[in-house]
Image (cartoon, rainbow, N blue to C red):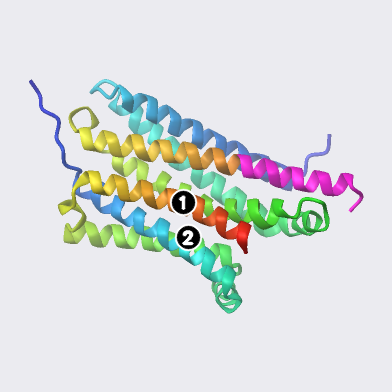
Amino acid sequence: MKLTISDVVLLGHAACGILGTLAALWVFVEVLNAREENARRIRWGATAVVICMCAACVLGGYWYLTAYPAEKAIILKGPWPSAHNVFMETKEHLFFVTLILALYLPIAAAEQLDANAMARKMVLCVALLIVLTGMAIEGAGAIVNHGVKVALLSGN
Amino acid sequence: MIRDSLKLGRASAAFALSATITVLFNTFLACAKDAYQPLSRFMASLAGHNWTTQGLADLVIFFGLGLIFLQTGWAGKMDPRRLIFLLTAAVVVAGAGLFVWYVLV
């Protein structure tokens, strides 16, 4: 198997994205049962979210700017042009929403969550939004990937 | 018995409001540059690609507004329930809005 830098960057981008989403789910579950004892774990989880999402942004951004134009041309000639026109366009802009939420999460999680109902609600809400947008972005990534595959299989 | 606080901290409230505005700004900018190509080209001239410029603009607005709201304390005076609702609504509008925009355009 020949693995190029572009492959490593793309797979690293997807891996960081899903790890960030899972870390947000971890934060959500911890905050459902917020106590003094798990406060440090919640903050570590929130830090993991922001690190993973920033890494996903840098890797995905690099791949999008350097390798994606060739794949975009293949998709647009194939039977699924909306894999780019709808799903990639939505994904690349929705990602900034997830990134902003991820950057905010450690700020919200820095509060004393076991003694502040509103802070708990805010962290639960932000973590859940990261999970939902993260899953939507991962799904869109799979559709973009399939757009390239069906284009290549149809001989374009 | 320990009673739960019902107020967000200054930083949490400030950056929640800043995140809400940034999410809406990001959605508006994505649609605007898609509809008006000169804007997209101008953004590309600033950082090499319009997407890069958009990301940098989002970061500047999120941290810039967050620090301003932190200094002024405006966001801290808002009802925390309203802040949570506004942030959630902004993300829902952004997700649905972007998808519908690219389906229709």
Q: State whether residue A34 is above or below residue A19.
A: above
Q: CA distance from mark 1 to mark 2?
A: 9 Å
Question: Residue at 84% across / 34% down in the picture?
Answer: A1
Residue where numbered disc 2 is placed: B27
Badge 1: chain ID: A
**A134 above or below A67?**
above
Q: Main SS type for the magenta part?
A: helix
Residue neighbourhood size for the residue with mark 2, other residues' Cα within 10 Å, grouped as few (<14), some (14–19), many (≥20) = many
| Residues drawn in magenta | A139-156
| Residue at the spot 35% in from the left edge and 38% down from the top edge | A125
Q: Are marks 1 and 2 in contact (CB under 8 Å)?
A: yes
Residue B5 rendering spot, x and y as whole percentages: 14, 35
The reply to whether residue B68 is in sight is: yes
Of residues A33 and A67, the one drawn nearer to the viewer in this rendering: A33
Residue position marked by numbered label 1 in the rendering: A97
Comparing B74 with A82, the one in front is A82
User: Under tag 2, what secondary structure?
Assistant: helix
